[in-house]
């Protein structure tokens, strides 16, 4: 069962905060991604958190991000990589990328390797444009 009412309370608190974390491209953060509709990726726990890769920084207020999962997903919509900070295999869910406000950032989890980031961008371009 979806927890929309609980998420709404958290979302209002996020919208009213002034704190913004400093972030860079390739970094992975725990993000208050929320409770979403249908097949959209949800966050978990009381803060509705999910790890998200910073794909493109637009400003100190927003970025394009890709939610991550540790569930095995070996298909064209996912990019598999090892995140050095937690030693786990992660899958970037390319079909779920979107714009995020930086007020959703909770805490830094790690940084994706340069080689993986380059390969992810190639796979993403292929997925979108071919």
Image (tube, rainbow, N blue to C red):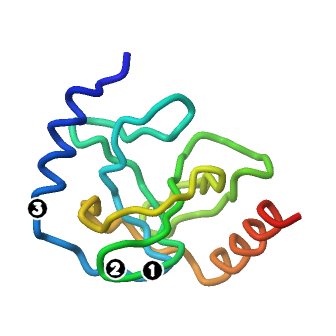
- State which tag comes first along the sequence, 2 or 1: 2
Query: Which residue in the protein does label 1 denote?
Result: 57
Q: Is residue 20 above or below residue 72?
A: below
Q: CA distance from mark 2 to mark 3?
A: 17 Å
x and y percentages locating residue 1 in the rendered image: 37, 15
How many dots with numbers?
A: 3
Label placed on residue 48: none
Q: Residue at x 12, y 49 (%)?
A: 13
Element type where label 1 sits in the image: strand
Question: Which mark's residue is nearer the viewer, 2 or 1?
Answer: 1
Query: Which residue in the protein does label 2 denote?
Result: 23
Q: Tell me whether the residue at label 2 lies in contact with that at label 1, contact meaning CB atoms closer than 8 angstroms.
A: yes
**Quadrant holding the C terminus:** bottom right
Q: CA distance from mark 2 to mark 1?
A: 8 Å
Q: CA distance from mark 3 to mark 1?
A: 20 Å
Query: Which residue in the protein does label 3 denote?
Result: 17
Q: Residue at x 49, y 68 (%)?
A: 64
In the image as oriented, which residue stretches furthest toward the top?
A: 1
- Is 121 left, or right, of 88 in this rendering? right
Element type where label 2 sits in the image: loop
Question: Which mark's residue is nearer the viewer, 2 or 3?
Answer: 3
């Amino acid at each position: 069962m979806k927890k929309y009412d609980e998420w709404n309370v958290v979302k209002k608190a996020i919208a009213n905060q002034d704190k913004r974390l400093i972030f860079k491209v390739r970094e992975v953060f725990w993000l208050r991604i929320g409770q979403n509709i249908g097949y959209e990726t949800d966050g978990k726990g009381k803060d509705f958190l999910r790890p998200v890769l910073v794909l493109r920084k637009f400003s100190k207020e927003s970025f394009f991000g890709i939610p991550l999962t540790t569930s095995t997903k070996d298909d064209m919509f996912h990019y598999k990589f090892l995140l050095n900070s937690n030693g786990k295999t992660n899958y970037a869910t390319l079909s779920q990328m979107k714009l995020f406000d930086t007020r959703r950032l909770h805490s830094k989890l790690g940084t994706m390797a340069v080689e993986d980031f380059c390969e992810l961008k190639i796979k993403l371009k292929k997925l979108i444009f071919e």
